[in-house]
Amino acid sequence: MEPVRTCVGCRARVACSTLLRVVERDGVLVPDEKAVLPGRGAWVHDTSACVDAAIRRRAFGRALRVSGPLDTQTFQHTHQRNG
């Protein structure tokens, strides 16, 4: 059975193969497409709706347990080009 994760955007519980893992590196959100980067990860559907909802609700900071400001602009722009 495949592991199940919760999307930080829509809060749906789905198989982790359908989600994109995101990690924090030096205060910047970084997509971890192969899910191999070290550290705590947040999972989100690779759609504009879920990414925007997670950013609007500040869900990435909570899921990643980051206390300071988190740069979401780079991740958001990268995602809009790819998604």
Image (tube, rainbow, N blue to C red):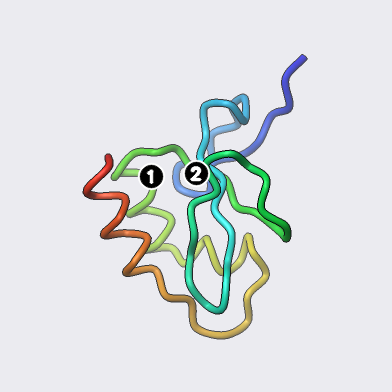
Residue 69 located left or right of residue 42:
left
Q: Is residue 36 left or right of residue 25?
A: right
Give me the residue at 69% from left, 29% from top: 4
Residue 44's label in the rendered image is: 2
Residue at 67% over, 70% down: 65
Residue type, label 2: Val
Query: Residue lying farthest right?
Result: 1
**Mark 1 secondary-structure assignment:** helix
Q: Residue lying farthest left?
A: 81
Residue 45 vertical placement versus 72 (above, below): above
When the figure is inspected, residue 22 is found, relative to residue 27, above or below; the finding is above
Rendering coords of residue 47 (x, y %): 34, 39
Quick one: 21 or 33, which is closer to the camera? 33
Q: Position of residue 14 (x, y in %)?
A: 59, 27
Which quarter of the image is occupied by the C terminus?
A: top left
The answer to which of 69 and 33 lies nearer the viewer is 33
Check the picture and name the quadrant holding the N terminus: top right
Q: Residue furthest bottom?
A: 68
Q: Amino acid at mark 1?
A: Cys
Total marks shown come to 2
Residue 50: numbered disc: 1
Q: Secondary structure at mark 2?
A: strand
The picture places residue 9, in percent across and down from the top left corner, at 45, 48
Q: Are marks 2 and 1 in contact (CB under 8 Å)?
A: yes
